[in-house]
Image (cartoon, helix red, strand yellow):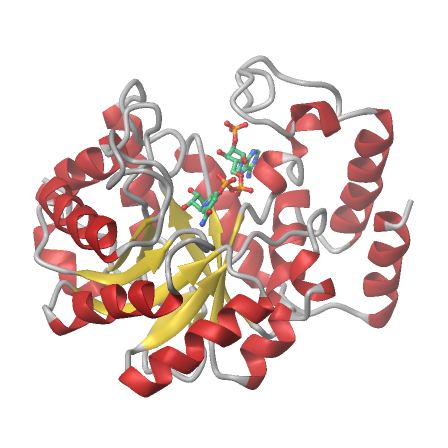
Amino acid sequence: MYIAKEGRYHKMVYNRCGNSGLKLPAVSLGLWKNFGHGSSLANAEQMVHTAFDLGITHFDLANNYGNPYNGSAEENFGRILQGMKQYRDEMCISTKAGYEMWQGPYGDKNGSRKYLTASLDQSLKRMGIEYVDIFYHHIFDPDTPLEETALALDNAVKQGKALYVGISNYDRQQTSDIMKIFKELKTPFIVNQPSYSMLNRWIESNKLDEFATENGIGLSVFSPLYQGFLTDRYLNGVPSDSRVGRGDTWIGDQLDEKMIAKLNALNEVAKNRGQKLSQLALSWILSNKAVATVIIGASRPQQIVENAACIEKLDFTADEKQRIEDILAM
Ligand SMILES: NC(=O)c1ccc[n+]([C@@H]2O[C@H](COP(=O)([O-])OP(=O)(O)OC[C@H]3O[C@@H](n4cnc5c(N)ncnc54)[C@H](OP(=O)(O)O)[C@@H]3O)[C@@H](O)[C@H]2O)c1
């Protein structure tokens, strides 16, 4: 039987998510890859336990994680939760709906009340829980009226199936539009989940981060390691057991000589700070005050241990920041 580690809350940093009362760990664990059908359940369980023992209280899921076996990550997480029931109130569990999930017009990529309502019911069943802490609309749907999507999320809260709501992959304008509706409804809308990393800075050019700060919305950012590029995995080539090596990503062809030189230069900055490249990449994101949490992925427990230690050095000198900018502009 799993007993959580004593002292697990001593080190982790907890940030308020926007202006809400909810605090999120600076580092959260995402279950997109390596938790679904075909992944080792023992390894998945070990990763969840390792995270929880490090004070990582937030676990990020979506209906379709485990794809192409949609729902299988939630099912496995449900199995793992069976052995952690006594810790439910110490956990913040999020899920999403928005991408293609089941056959036919109601499970297709969309933001309808029909789809979101049915999907959340399915997610709760798969995970064996009564409510999620955060329910997200996964991606903006230009074909569904925003009022309908907002009302569906609001309804999930009114039904007691979600405590807070969020949106994901919404840009600044889309966030502003739906925020206005949530304000009228008094929906506890607290978070937007965009991609963000040293190698993907669209939220800065879009000024989504600025907007989030001004409006008290937290950002929970995904793929903070650019799917593993910003670690020591690819400094000397492509290991066959890596995400790129397995062909489990669409960004593998970006890993050219120029990118590898950039990663090695960033690694030098990391070394001078006494960090690993992954830790540098995560600390750098957390220095953007709009960000409440970085949602990391992992394929083994040790990666979670390494990544969580980024909180030991969150400050940057002006010289370090400039050096990083120069490298990223290379
Ligand atoms: N809202 C959305 O649309 C959306 C989209 C994508 C993701 N997400 C969320 O964000 C989470 C994270 O996404 P992600 O998996 O792309 O994140 P990531 O943290 O950028 O990449 C994770 C991958 O990097 C490698 N890695 C991690 N730590 C490492 C370390 N210390 N040393 C060496 N390699 C390391 C592992 O890959 P290998 O070991 O397999 O090489 C791991 O699976 C997802 O699980 C999900 O919850 C949300």
Q: Position of residue 293 (x, y in %)?
A: 48, 63
* Residue at x 36% of width, y 47% of height: 110
Query: Left of 151 or right of it: where is 180?
Result: right
Query: Could you tell me which residue is drawn at 20 percent across and 33 percent down?
Result: 76
Front in this rendered view, residue 245 or 217: 217
Q: Residue at x 72, y 47 (%)?
A: 199
Is residue 105 shown above or below 103?
below
| Above or below, 123 relative to 202 | above
Residue 297: percent from the left, percent from the top? 46, 41
Residue 14, image x, y percentages: 42, 71
Residue shown at the point (60%, 75%) measured from the top left: 289
Q: Residue 235 placed where, x, y %?
A: 74, 28
Locate residue 260 relative to residue 226 in the image: left or right: right
Q: Does 47 sit left or right of 309 as displayed? A: left
- For the N terminus, give its image quadrant: top left
In the rendered view, tell whether residue 186 sits above or below residue 204. Answer: below
Asked where in the image residue 72 lies, by quadrant, the reply is top left
